[in-house]
Image (spheres, grey):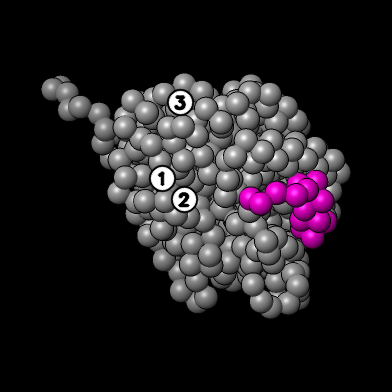
Amino acid sequence: MSGERAPTAENPPVRRLADWSPERLRELADDHGTPLYVFDLDRARQNYRRMAEAFPEADVYYAAKANTARPVLQALADEGAGVECASAGELARALDAGVDGSHVHYTAVNPPDRDLDVAVRLAEEHPGVTITVGAEDTLDRLADRGYDGRICVRVNPGVGAGHHEKVTTGADAKFGVPYERAADLAESAAGAFEVVGIHAHAGSGISGEDLSAHRDLVGRMGELARDVEGRGIDLEFVDVGGGFGVPYSPDEDPLDLEAVAEATREALGETEATLAVEPGRYLVADAGVLLTSANTVKETPSGVVVGVGAGMTTLARPAIYDAHHEIRNVAPGADERPSREVTVAGPVCESGDSLGDHWLPDPQRGDLLAVGNAGAYGYEMASQYNSRPRPASVVSDGDDARLARRRETIADVTAVEPEVDR
Ligand SMILES: *Cc1c(COP(=O)(O)O)cnc(C)c1O
């Protein structure tokens, strides 16, 4: 690892929505239509570099579920990132994108048989893949399939962090084997598999205030590593998961990555194993925006409603997590208009289908709106509910922009249905 200590002027700790060029965004919307996800590969590279520089001793695995677009996986892998996969589908995509098996972890959460079939086959074809198991019987199911390769034990650390109860996983019994059972399990698994790591993920939302929860988790993992090593198992890595927060509001400070890294090192303590981290959101959130157009502007007794093309099927986070995403009116000359508070609502027949209330330069029909921090868990959580085709997504790389996913059509929505005689 070389170069200056992050963050630097060339690599600020956060890219705000206001930093995106409105001209460029309008150009992309003209070329590709809306709703449109726009992703800047350079920003994801910068985020990776800051993370790698803050954790020079650690292996950084990108949690692919935040954004699985192939150019994103490739750009981060080219920077040196490994990839953490949450399903057989993600595993296939990471390997298809050319990521070396030895840089890929597959985290099996209550895995369906089909996922295990695929994972075992792919692990045979790509030596070095590590399968992370969070339940004892997953080991039996792997053994039944003839697997005897690399295993990491996912632990339920009993502590969690998260900006919303639905993203706090650390203390949720669904994830990982109970902490008290983990060392015994690692020991017994070592007879049949190659036990290479232990893992925990506390949820999404490590922030300045949340460092104590992170410290607890890492401290417990350090203790467990020493216990496991004491039983004669040489761990390659101790993976303390992701959850590195990003500011969703303009007045929120970015995470002090150096402080998190320092706390992590301190809490982990002595171990021969290499530290591993799994940032998802942190690497990609501020590298993406969602563009949408104002279709309707309606005065109502309770305020102004701006109807836009992007709804909960395009960006689900506001509806699922009450997440706040900044919105900017990037129409030409919009900045000169007076601002007003408006509700930005999508086209789905659900009252929860709203991108929230925002102060915006007086929106007019046809205006282009940009939604910030849409690079993580944006396209990935898009659905076809209401028979709404999923949007297009483009990646820009310097001056180039190319399609990562074409816009779906109604024919794509119905393509999986058997033909019926009418
Ligand atoms: C989702 C997930 C991550 C990434 O979480 P972020 O909040 O996006 O950093 C990392 N590890 C595991 C196991 C996950 O499930």
Q: Amino acid at mark 3?
A: Thr
Residue 333 picture quarter? bottom right
- Indicate the position of residue 131 as horizontal and vertical percent values: 46, 39
Q: Amino acid at mark 2?
A: Val
Task: Looking at the picture, tell me which residue is in the foreground, 9 or 89.
Answer: 89
Mark 2 element type: strand
Q: Which residue has dot 3 on it?
A: 138
Whole-number angstrom distance, CA of label 1 to CA of label 3:
17 Å
**Image point (33%, 25%), residue name:** 144
The region drawn magenta spans 255-273
Whole-number angstrom distance, CA of label 2 to CA of label 3:
19 Å
Side of 363 where 249 appears, left or right:
right
Is 256 magenta? The answer is: yes
Q: Amino acid at mark 1?
A: Leu
| Overall secondary structure of the magenta section | helix
Task: Looking at the picture, tell me which residue is in the foreground, 146 or 256.
Answer: 146
Whole-number angstrom distance, CA of label 2 to CA of label 1:
8 Å
Q: Earlier in the sequence, mark 2 or mark 1?
A: 1
Is 338 magenta? The answer is: no
> Is residue 204 shown above or below 33?
above
> Mark 2 or 1, which is nearer the eye?
2
Q: Is residue 387 visible?
A: no
Q: Earlier in the sequence, mark 2 or mark 3?
A: 2
**Image point (84%, 40%), residue name:** 212
Q: Is residue 191 visible?
A: yes
Looking at mark 1, is its residue's CB closer than 8 Å to ligand 1?
no
Mark 1 element type: helix
Discs 2, 1 touching: Cβ within 8 Å: yes
Q: Which residue has dot 1 on it?
A: 91
Q: Which residue has dot 2 on it?
A: 104
